[in-house]
Image (spheres, grey):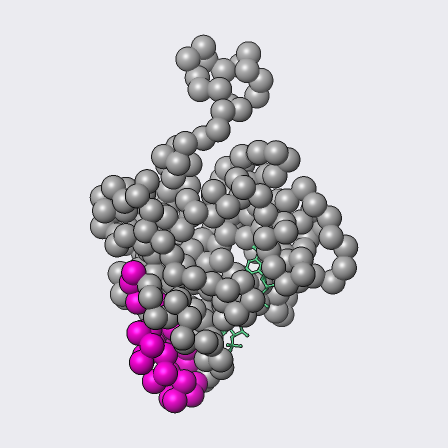
Amino acid sequence: MTAADLPRDAPDPDREWSFDELADAYAYPPEAETVPWLRANMVSSLDGAGQHDGRSQPLSSETDMRIFGILRALADVVVVGAETVRLEGYRPARAREVFAERRAAAGQGPAPVIAVVSASLNLDFSLPLFTEPLVPTLVLTGAASSPERRAEAERAGAEVVIAGDGPGVDPERAVAALAERGLRRLLTEGGPRLLGQFVAADVLDELCLTVSPTMTAGTAQRIAGGPSVEVPKRFAVASLLEQDGFLFTRYRRI
Ligand SMILES: NC(=O)c1ccc[n+]([C@@H]2O[C@H](COP(=O)([O-])OP(=O)(O)OC[C@H]3O[C@@H](n4cnc5c(N)ncnc54)[C@H](OP(=O)(O)O)[C@@H]3O)[C@@H](O)[C@H]2O)c1
C-alpha cells in the first residue's frame, strides 16, 4: 500500500509505533480469556540461524527488543527452556510502569511469571531469577526428576510444577498445568529444543517471528529443533511490520 492509498487522516505508516499501539496489535485473542493460547517469540537470521555464538542477541535489534518487551508485558507467563536460561543469563521479568494499567485491567499481576522447563534441574537456584522475582518463578519438571533438586528449587523460593510422568515435561500437560493456575496467555521464548516439542505436540497457536536481515552460515540451531513432524504444520500470516530491514511477522496456526 502506498501513502496515496491511505485515507487523508490515516496515521503515517512509517511512524514509530507507541507502546499502546504495539500492545493493541499484539493483543492475545479473546479466547485466551477462557482457554490457553501459546505464542512463541523467536528471531531468525535470513539463513535460518536461531543463535550466533550461543546467543540470540547478535540477530536482534532495538525494535526487536521493544516487541520482545511488549510480548512479555501482554503475557501471564513466559515459558523457557533450561538451556536458554543457562546461556542467556535469564533474570526475573520486570514490572514496567508503562504497562501497569493495562496489566491491572486484564487482571494480571505486575509482571509475567517465568516458568523454566527442566528435567535435570541443573539450574543455579541462587540466581535472582529464583530468589528475587516479583512473582515466584515456576519450575516445570517431571515426576521422576530429582527430589533433592526440587527441594532446592523450593528452598530458593521457586514453585515446582509437575507436568510429566518421567523426568521430563509433557508439552500438553505443561500448557494444561499453567492454565489450571489461571495462566492462559502463554508466551514461550524457546529455545529451539523446547519450541520443537510444542510444535510436535500441536500446542503452538501462534509464532511471532522476527526475520533478521543477517546471514551467519555455520551450523547454528534453527528456531525449532528435535525430531521433525510427519506433516508440516500450516500457519497463516496474521500481521507483518518492518523496521530497519527487520520483519516482525506473526503467524497463527490454521
Ligand atoms: N532465536 C531465538 O529467538 C532464540 C530464543 C531462545 C533461545 N535461543 C538460543 O537457543 C539456544 C538454547 O536453546 P536450546 O534449544 O539448546 O535449549 P532450550 O530449548 O532453551 O532448553 C533445552 C533444555 O530445556 C529442558 N527441556 C526441554 N524440553 C524439556 C522437556 N520436555 N522436559 C523437561 N525439560 C525439558 C532441558 O533442560 P535440562 O537439561 O535442565 O533437563 C533441555 O536441556 C541458545 O543459544 C539461545 O541463545 C534462541
Say above or below: 169 vs 61.
Answer: below
Q: Position of residue 217 (x, y in %)?
A: 77, 55
Q: Quadrant of ligand 1?
A: bottom right
In which quadrant is the N terminus drawn?
top right
Q: Position of residue 117 (x, y in %)?
A: 45, 71
Query: Is there any visible trace of residue 250 in the rendered image?
Result: yes
Q: Quick check: 216 left or right of 192? A: right
Q: How many marks?
A: 0
Tell which of 203 and 207 is nearer to you.
Answer: 207
Residue 70 is one of the magenta-drawn residues: no
Residue at (54% x, 36% y) in the render: 240
Q: Quadrant of residue 27?
A: top left
Tell which of 167 and 33 is nearer to you.
Answer: 167
Q: Position of residue 209 (x, y in %)?
A: 55, 47
Residue 149 is one of the magenta-drawn residues: yes
Q: Quick check: 53 left or right of 5? A: right
Q: Quadrant of residue 9?
A: top left
Say above or below: 149 vs 190.
Answer: below
Residue at (54% x, 34% y) in the render: 241
Residue at (55% x, 15% y) in the render: 3
Residue at (64% x, 58% y) in the render: 51
* Residue farthest toward the right in the current orientation of the protein: 217
Tell which of 24 and 157 is nearer to you.
Answer: 157
Q: Position of residue 30 (x, y in %)?
A: 31, 45
Query: Is there any visible trace of residue 196 in the rendered image?
Result: no
Where are the magenta residues, as a range? 134-162
Q: Quadrant of residue 178?
A: bottom left
Q: Quick check: 72 left or right of 58? A: left
